[in-house]
Image (tube, coloured by chain):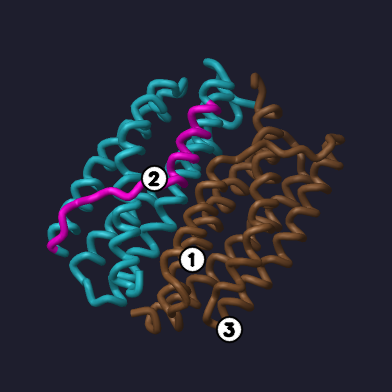
Chain colours: A cyan, B brown
Amino acid sequence: MKSLHELFVHLLQDIYFAEQQIEKSLPELAQSAKSENLRLALESHLKETKGQIERLDEIFGLMQLSPETEECEAIEGLIDEAQEVINATEEQPVRDAGIIASAQAVEHYEIARYGTLAAWADQLGLSAVSVLLNQTLEEEKKADATLNSLALLQVNQKAA
Amino acid sequence: MKSLHELFVHLLQDIYFAEQQIEKSLPELAQSAKSENLRLALESHLKETKGQIERLDEIFGLMQLSPETEECEAIEGLIDEAQEVINATEEQPVRDAGIIASAQAVEHYEIARYGTLAAWADQLGLSAVSVLLNQTLEEEKKADATLNSLALLQVNQKAA
């Protein structure tokens, strides 16, 4: 990769793969949640994730590229860790604290990636692409903040 | 794991492993940087990382536990991705943009983990532990902000 444009496309394919893995893993995460509010938050984020995948399709379209994925080892590791926490905690209030921790680690991965992609899109003069990336970035930040509130106001206390 | 305390120790061992992997990988990341300022920022974060590992040792001590690691697949994936970017970009300005993206993804992983650990420490009444975790959390946020500024003010423009 010799240009920022090539690196941008590489990272776009990486997050496209990551979003698809997140879409696959969220239903189990939601079903494993004991707290009703946590389950609803994860289900709502699943809908949002589907919209984010469509937004990535739109970005590939704007760039006249066919949507392709690049295997992303980071998201695989993050999802494996989430799975381990579910398996290791059984159906107890503490599991919800673990689910939130796992989901927030995933959110932060996405915040880092979309932040980088939006900055690179600006630098490359891809303003329509940047607008779409920033929309997703704001959704990820809000999703992280929602999980944070759930942990601090409800879940951690029950888990302790 | 049936208690928040057990889950806390598990996550502490996970980040202890992660910090050691970061300590190992930062020298190569710094050496691969073309920008002098980026190299200096990564070297400075290496020193900070060593301090963060000592802080984790102190936390294990406060909790009367021997420091142990838990393999963390997420950090392995993040570091593998950083390595791939270095290998794929050769010695060009665009590599610096890729190094910053990789380092920011690692920072965000740490921000998520230390944020969770600090909240759990508060919930568990481990106030001295929480103070130490929050010190590291603030360092990670600052490291991320420094990388962000470097990207926006210097590196991205040269890479484009």
Secondary structure beneath label 3? helix
In the image, B61 versus A93, the foreground residue is B61
Q: Which residue is mark 2?
A: A143
Q: Amino acid at mark 3?
A: Glu
Chain letter of disc 2 in the image: A
Q: Which residue is mark 1?
A: B86
Looking at the rendering, the stretch of residues picked out in magenta corresponds to: A64-85
Q: Is residue B110 above or below residue B42?
A: above
Give the distance between the C-alpha atoms of the residues marked 2 and 1, in whole angstroms: 31 Å
Say if the magenta span includes residue B94.
Answer: no
Left or right of B22, for residue A118 = left
Whole-percent x, y for residue B39 in the image: 60, 77
| Front tag of 2 and 1 | 1
Is B23 in front, or is A24?
Answer: B23
Do callouts 1 and 3 mark residues in contact (Cβ within 8 Å)? no
Residue under label 3: B36
Q: Residue furthest top?
A: A91
Q: Chain of mark 3?
A: B
